[in-house]
Amino acid sequence: MDVHVAVRLVHTLGMGVLLGGAVLVASLRDPAPASRAYEWAFWVAMGVQVLTGVGNLGAVGDPGPATTWGTLLTWKLALVLLLLVASALRLLARPRLKAPALRWAYGGTALLLAIIGGLAVVLAHG
Amino acid sequence: MDEAREAGWLEAVGLATLHVSLLVGALVLALHRAGTLGQLLQGIGTLPGVALFLVLWGLTLGATRQALVQMREKPLREAMGVGGVWGGAVGASFVWIALTASFISGRAPPIAYLFSLEAAAFGFVGGCLVGAVAALLDTALLAAARRLAR
């Protein structure tokens, strides 16, 4: 398998873990036990997403910030930075949060991931 | 692994990934806005880029774990000092490993290796700055998390 295809495959699968896991945890009546396992998966997958995302950019090439594609990429990168900071806050607050607050935290994560995923789909199809 | 130890490692993995991802993400965003991202990424190549990221991630994880243990319940200035020292260690190690790998792979001439200690010193200074900012961010996030959970 070509290395760029492998990088793209891992990037897509990683998004599935992040988004699917967040939706699952947010939908549980008591999200606390599952949230710990999700946090492990989230942070490992997030590191892999940044790694493979940069790899994808190297393979696709960056047409510059002035194009529509470039503007969308700027938004995607800014949202990823926002997701990282918000998720660190969720990670640190998680042990002290009650079930309703946890559901909101993981629901918010899922929403942000869905927006980033939507932008990624648009970028991938030019 | 007992629960407290596992929680400590989870916090370290999360915050180390945050630090590396914010640093790389902010650099990528700045270079993209400047219009020089494509050239740089093609110059590095996919596999060396993956290796560099994994080295930085691993070094940052070890340093973050140690820094979190040492800076717990410390005042902000001391916490930033601890973060700065560990960040410096990461910066110096990363630059030295990257240079050594580039000499071994033949990407850089052997004569340039004479300056590897100076380059590592620059890496230490840059790492100190990044580490201090990371400690400031972690302290702010911890305070915000406590407030949220009240």
Image (cartoon, coloured by chain):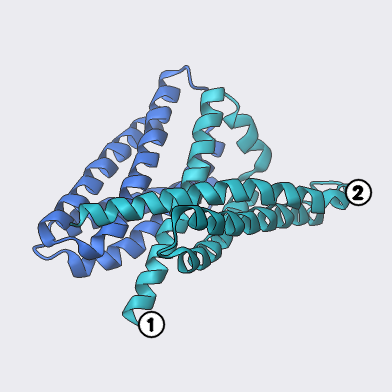
Chain colours: A blue, B cyan
Q: Position of residue A72 (x, y in %)?
A: 38, 26
Q: Residue furthest top?
A: A66
Q: Position of residue A115 (x, y in %)?
A: 27, 37
The residue beneath circle 1 is B1
Q: Nearer the viewer, residue B89 or B94?
A: B89
User: Looking at the image, is mark 2 or mark 1 nearer the viewer?
Assistant: 1
> Where B48 sits versus B39, above or below?
below
**Extreme residue toward the right, this view:** B111
Report the residue at 37% width, 49% height from top. Answer: B140
Task: Looking at the picture, tell me which residue is in the foreground, B36 or B70.
Answer: B70
Q: Quadrant of the C terminus of chain B?
A: bottom left
Residue A115 appears in the picture as rendered: yes
Q: Chain of mark 1?
A: B
Q: Residues within 10 Å of mark 2 (few under 14, many from 20)?
A: few
Asked whether the residues under the numbered discs 2 and 1 touch, taking CB atoms below 8 Å apart as contact, a structural biologist would say no
Q: Quadrant of the N terminus of chain B?
A: bottom left
On the rendered structure, is A31 left or right of B77? left
Q: Is residue B96 left or right of residue B62?
A: right
Alpha-carbon distance for marks 2 and 1?
A: 47 Å
Residue at the extreme bottom of the image, as rendered: B2
Q: Residue B7, relative to residue A69: is it above or below?
A: below
- Which residue occupies 55% across, 59% down? B82
Q: Nearer the viewer, residue A123 or B145?
A: B145
List the residue tagged with mark 2: B111
Q: Which residue is found at the position 74% from the left and 51% from the top?
A: B121
Tell me where residue A24 sits by quadrant.
Answer: bottom left
Is residue A2 something that shows in the picture? no
Q: Is residue B33 above or below residue B11?
A: above
